[in-house]
Amino acid sequence: MGDGSVSDALSRLLEGGWVSILNARAAETWGRIGGEGRPEVLALAALCGQAVEAGHVCLDLNHLTSWCDASGRLLPEWLERDVEVCSAWLESSPLVATAEATDSAEGAEVRPLVLDAARRLYLRRYWDYQESLALGIRGRLAEHSPLDVDEDCLREGLDRLFGDEAAEQEPDFQRMAASGAVRSRFFVLSGGPGTGKTSTVARILALLIEQSEAVSKAGLRIRLLAPTGKAAAHLGQSIARAIQSLNCAQVTRGAIPTEASTVHRALGAGGTPTRYRYDAAYPLPVDVVLVDEASMVDIALMARLVSALPPDARLILLGDRDQLASVEAGAVLGDIAGSRALAANPGRPPAALQLVKSHRFAPGSGLGALVEAVHEGDAETVLDLLEDPSQPDLRRLDPEESDRLRAEVARGYEPFAVADDAPGRLAALEHYRILCAHRMGQDGLTALNSLVESILFEQGAINPKAGLWYDGRPILVTQNDYISGLYNGDVGVVGCSSGEDRSQREDFRVLFEKPEGGPRWLGVRRLGPVETVFAMTVHKSQGSEFDQVLLVLPTEPSPVATRELLYTAISRARRGVCVRAGEEAIRSALRRRVERMSGLAEALESERF
């Protein structure tokens, strides 16, 4: 980067769109306070902050030559990207602590950046999150922390809940997962749609309750958690259904909770995103914590959760490691599940297991085959299935076929259009949804919501011109509101409750479904941030399922269109999928993988702890 003032160097990155104003100003401030005037170091500091904004835990110097920004651009040529040169600059900087120094009390805490031995640069806060999380997980995996397991009780419970192992013709991975989870204070159960994760974990909870009764006679304090309100409600409902068929005592079924909450709420989130009631000094009063949709949990929240658990509490993570990672920093579930630290050793069974057999799709299901082909990145099979006339529930629309797109949307939202009240419209929303990669642009969320509104307006089903809160507007809650009891991901429909005058717009309220079932009406003035939800981003769709899904991929090349995005979107569907994209766009997305820069997997395997 050569000569030039600090402001000139950061301005070039800022004006080129490689860093935000926030990260440029932060780097400049650190340099002024810490006595670092070299523009090369400050540029790397700003890029480190930008990497976190892009979902990475760190800036891996080994990837500087291949790292792209949100627009898919490589870093500018004038920026020095040689690993050895950049490392030498950072190692000599008063702003940077080495990983080894952070283990000592040499004042490293005042340094805003940390460089580890693998040449990864961290914001200090994210280095602390990673180290805290790795330490907490390793402590639960440690051989010096044995569990008191009644083996006879466990063997009888496994045979009763999963069947006699000797009679099985092939390995029962659900049984293996249950056995491993009971024998470990930390366990990861991953699997795709319909692989039986929820039914397996319900049986795990039954086994843990039976163990508690056999070993200590004490009741077990269990918490069910999920990253969003929608996912929490779905988890509670799924567990409630699963326990009905459990082959166990009624008292055991009654001890399994069916109410779930968000991770934020369980930790006692305060008025700011970083303030929580429970932490290492004041841990959660729990014995077992189950977190569903764990792929959506970022590294900061997962670190806080693990820190807030009592040392002898069990933690079970449930999710699909192949889905999109969290919006915020980290790909925590994937990093943990893929770490060698969770592999079996002589003193412990494996602490992670992947379920692969799907029970959602019937043998020969086209949708099941499509999900598998996307998962494997098999572009030819994906395209063949989408064009196969014998698979009417699988379709592809060419981006130029605007009339076919309108016809597809009209067909998908026909049940919504013919429903004449809010309950009918709310029910119809669960059957069909448009998913997209971006919020803005011609293929983005805003444009697609406007498209649906125009189609339904032409049909006389809704009138968006009547105002923001028009009758029939479907809305998505985008922020947790613990006072009203609404959570990020909740869906409602504007309308009138029974007996109200639909001609009086001031009477309009929003209908939501209670987690336990039944209607809940709220006045629009009680709502926090919401958005129209005929279409939603694929990220927002995680934790939801629909009968039919229309996936709209960007027509222009986009780094956001990845195999993980396709897999997540298509696996939201129960019966059918329509993909609006060109053949090359699908091929390109299947080739492109999400890669989050992180050192968590290695930290879990480190001998430093």
Image: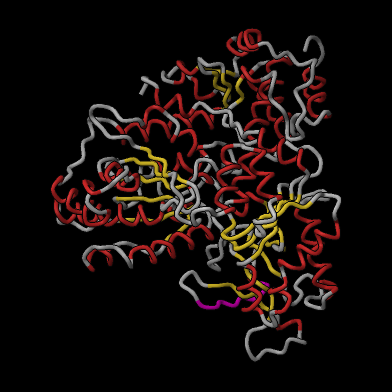
- Residue 553 visible within the image: yes
Examine the structure image and report whether residue 82 is included in the region drawn in magenta. no
Whether the magenta-drawn stretch holds residue 520 is answered as: yes
Q: Give the image location of residue 348, x and y in percent.
A: 26, 32
Residue depicted at 78% across the width and 75% down the height: 462
Please give the range of residues in magenta: 518-525
Q: Residue furthest bottom?
A: 499
Image position of 482 (left or right of 355): right
Q: Quadrant of the N terminus?
A: top right
Above or below for 323 versus 487: above
The residue that appears at 63% across and 12% down in the rendered structure is: 83
| Image point (21%, 40%), residue name | 147
Up-down: is 382 above or below 337?
Answer: below
Q: Nearer the viewer, residue 577 or 474?
A: 577
Q: Is residue 316 or residue 173 the one in the foreground? A: 173
Residue 346 locus on image (x, y percent): 24, 27
At x 44% / y 65%, what residue is drawn? Answer: 237
Residue 274, position in %: x, y? 53, 45
Q: Nearer the viewer, residue 325 or 395?
A: 395
- Quarter the C terminus occupies: top left
Quadrant in the picture for residue 221: bottom left
User: Most prominent secondary structure in the magenta stretch?
Assistant: strand
Q: Is residue 443 left or right of residue 97?
A: right
Q: In the rendered image of this protein, does residue 141 appear above or below residue 513?
A: above
Q: Position of residue 136 (x, y in %)?
A: 37, 35
Residue 77 placement, left or right of 343? right
